Image (tube, rainbow, N blue to C red):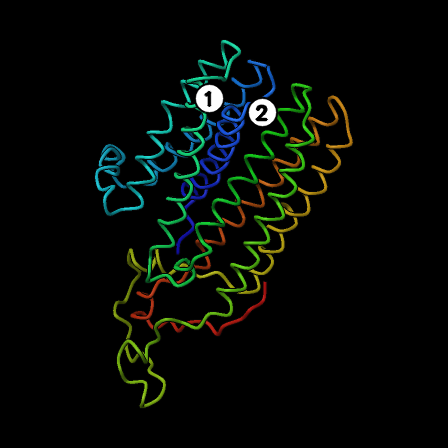
Amino acid sequence: MHPAPSIIVLTTASGAGDGLLFLLGLGAALGLLPADSWLGLAALGLALGLITLGFLSSALHLGHPERAWRAVSQWRSSWLSREGALALLTYPPAVILGIGMSFGTTSGGFALAGLLAAIGAAATVWCTGMIYASLKPIREWHQPLTAPVYLAFALMSGALLLHLLLALFGVPRLAAGVLALLAIILAFGLKALWWRRIGAAKPISTPESATGLGRFGLVRMVEPPHTQTNYLLSEMGFVVARRHAQKLRGLAFAFGLGGGLVLTLLALFATSILAAGLGLLAALAALAGIALERWLFFAEASHTVTLYYGRRPETPSAAV
């Protein structure tokens, strides 16, 4: 699949925003947020800003952005519509939570608003993952780990951003830092398992199964269906060489797992401006790793329609 930059920005930015909003809302509901209204408002503003950036990026990906409102009309049957509807429904409780933070309180109705915002953020990320997990023609996506991987990376990026903000405002951040470390390990552990599963899985369809001629041997194309490229080839026929994919996987682990872990650990033992600087570098390294992971998520996906153009499924390989 063609890895469009707008979709990479959408899933990376909105995932980080929803992850941060989830932690803020849950922290407000449980009374765990520090009593600092400026910190709360800055964190909430960052979360909603990233979510909005994802929304704007998704609108640019549409052929007719002016019709984006129709994307939420099919929520009964479409995971894409459910994602859009839940994202919109998450804004009101988040704004109510922000009002409470501006008055220095997150109790009572404001705590309930925080809980609703946290549930909405988590549900939105789940729907994002299910958009891809529900597509049967793409075997790499159509598996149980796809949506959990999206949730894990949202939690990871949200925890790193929260740790950064706590360091900037000079408030206790040990719990946030430990959560970020655990979330990094969880996210890249699930992603490694995801890559191993898609590498070991056998193709769902082959030219032989599609034509019913497998009993006669390998089926090959005699003539191409067209003499020039078309939309299907440009959007669904994108190919990344296996050696390049392996290098990019290594870079994703180096930035997200290695950089995120080391820099967060250093930040936990640092103080003042140094801790904030290390926290910022950890968040940026992790987001770079997530962006690479997301690019590969699309680039390595193979749509069944490419069989019509003579492409053969790759031989299974469990390498991560």
Q: Which residue is mark 2?
A: 32
- Name the kind of residue labelled 2 in the image: Leu
- Residue 264 locus on image (x, y percent): 69, 37
Residue type pointed to by label 1? Ala
**Relative horizontal placement of residue 181, taking residue 116 as reference (left or right):** right
Residue farthest to the bottom, as pictured: 216
Where does the image place residue 46, in percent across and percent down from the top left?
A: 51, 25
Mark 2 surroundings: few (<14), some (14-19) or many (≥20) residues within 10 A: few
Residue 106 position in % (x across, y down): 50, 17
- Which residue was labeled with disc 1? 111
Q: Secondary structure at mark 2?
A: loop
Q: CA distance from mark 1 to mark 2?
A: 11 Å
For marks 1 and 2 on the same chain, the one whose residue lies earlier in the sequence: 2
Name which residue lies at 36% across and 22% down: 92
In-image side of 295 versus 92 (left or right) = right
Q: Secondary structure at mark 1?
A: helix
Q: Is residue 215 above or below residue 286?
A: below
- In the depicted view, which residue is nearer to us: 210 or 89? 89
Residue 39: which quarter of the image? top right
In the foreground, 150 or 305: 150
Q: Quadrant of residue 243?
A: bottom right
Q: Residues within 10 Å of mark 1 (few under 14, many from 20)?
A: many
Seen from the viewer's position, the closer of residues 187 and 282 is: 187
Q: Is residue 108 left or right of residue 217?
A: right
Q: Classify 61 as above or below 317.
A: above
- Cβ–Cβ under 8 Å for marks 1 and 2: no
Q: Residue at x 53, y 11 (%)?
A: 104
Quadrant for the N terminus in the image: bottom left
Q: Nearer the viewer, residue 171 or 58?
A: 171
